[in-house]
Image (tube, rainbow, N blue to C red):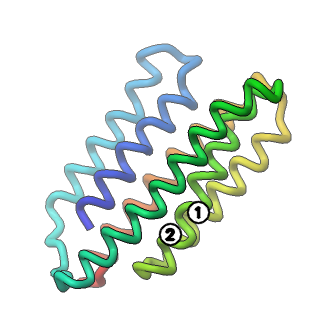
């Protein structure tokens, strides 16, 4: 649970910085502060105990899908400029990240990841329809909020003793 919240908040901060990059450092500090606050809150929640076999299976599952995601991310950033659509890379990245949540949601199982993945896919898809200049903000800010909301949902489930 804590590892999930750490990962989601760190990537929430990264997405937030991407979305607020046009506002300079004061604006880009906001997502970092939000992520630190979420990590501080989550660190006070007692993590439910997971069986060692489950932890190993989940680690393998996450490792496999993160590797697939990494390859797709590399391909996105390598191919988007070659195809003449460099401004589409960030929205496509959101779609790739969203897609990687779906098998993880099923395999852990963690129902909140279905919502996380679907929302990120929708965000990336909608951002692709916008003018190129608006795509980073239209992708980064919503993706940060989606990941932070997922952290809160996971934290609340953990407070109720539900394994995530």
Name the residue at the top extreme: 24
Please provide percent x and percent y for residue 154: 36, 69
Disc 1 vs disc 2: Cβ atoms closer than 8 Å? yes
Name the residue carrying label 1.
117
Gap between marks 1 and 2, in whole Å? 6 Å
**Which residue corresponds to the image point at 44% horizontal and 63% vertical from the top-left?**
64
Q: Is residue 146 visible?
A: yes
Q: Is residue 134 visible?
A: no
Please provide percent x and percent y for residue 124: 70, 47
Which numbered dot is residue 109?
A: none
**Which residue corresponds to the image point at 48% horizontal and 29% vertical from the top-left?**
17
**Which residue corresponds to the image point at 31% horizontal and 57% vertical from the top-left?**
5
Please provide percent x and percent y for residue 18: 54, 29
Q: Height in image: 4 above or below 157?
A: above
Residue 28 falls in which quadrant of the image?
Answer: top left
74 or 36: nearer the viewer: 74
Q: Residues within 10 Å of mark 2 (few under 14, many from 20)?
A: many
Q: Height in image: 131 above or below 142?
A: above
In the picture, which quadrant includes the N terminus?
Answer: bottom left
10 or 35: nearer the viewer: 10
How many numbered marks does the figure carry? 2
Q: Height in image: 53 above or below 31?
A: below
Name the residue carrying label 2.
113
Q: Is residue 29 left or right of residue 27?
A: left
Q: Is residue 51 left or right of residue 91?
A: left
Q: Is residue 153 left or right of residue 79?
A: left
**Which residue corresponds to the image point at 34% horizontal and 51% vertical from the top-left?**
7
Q: Helix or strand or loop: what does disc 1 sit on? A: helix
Q: Is residue 109 left or right of residue 83?
A: left
Q: Helix or strand or loop: what does disc 2 sit on? A: helix
In the picture, which quadrant includes the C terminus?
Answer: bottom left
């Amino acid at each position: 649970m804590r590892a999930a919240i750490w990962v989601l908040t760190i990537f929430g901060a990264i997405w937030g910085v991407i979305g607020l990059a046009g506002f300079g450092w004061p604006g880009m500090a906001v997502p970092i502060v939000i992520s630190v606050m979420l990590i501080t809150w989550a660190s006070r929640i007692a993590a439910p105990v997971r069986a060692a076999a489950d932890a190993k299976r989940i680690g393998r599952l996450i490792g496999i899908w993160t590797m697939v995601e990494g390859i797709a991310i590399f391909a996105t950033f390598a191919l988007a400029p070659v195809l003449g659509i460099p401004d589409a890379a960030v929205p496509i990245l959101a779609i790739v990240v969203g897609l990687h949540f779906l098998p993880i949601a099923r395999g852990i199982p963690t129902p909140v990841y279905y919502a996380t993945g679907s929302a990120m896919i929708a965000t990336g898809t909608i951002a692709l329809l916008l003018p190129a200049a608006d795509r980073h903000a239209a992708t980064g800010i919503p993706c940060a909020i989606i990941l932070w909301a997922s952290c809160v949902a996971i934290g609340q489930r953990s407070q109720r003793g539900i394994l995530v």
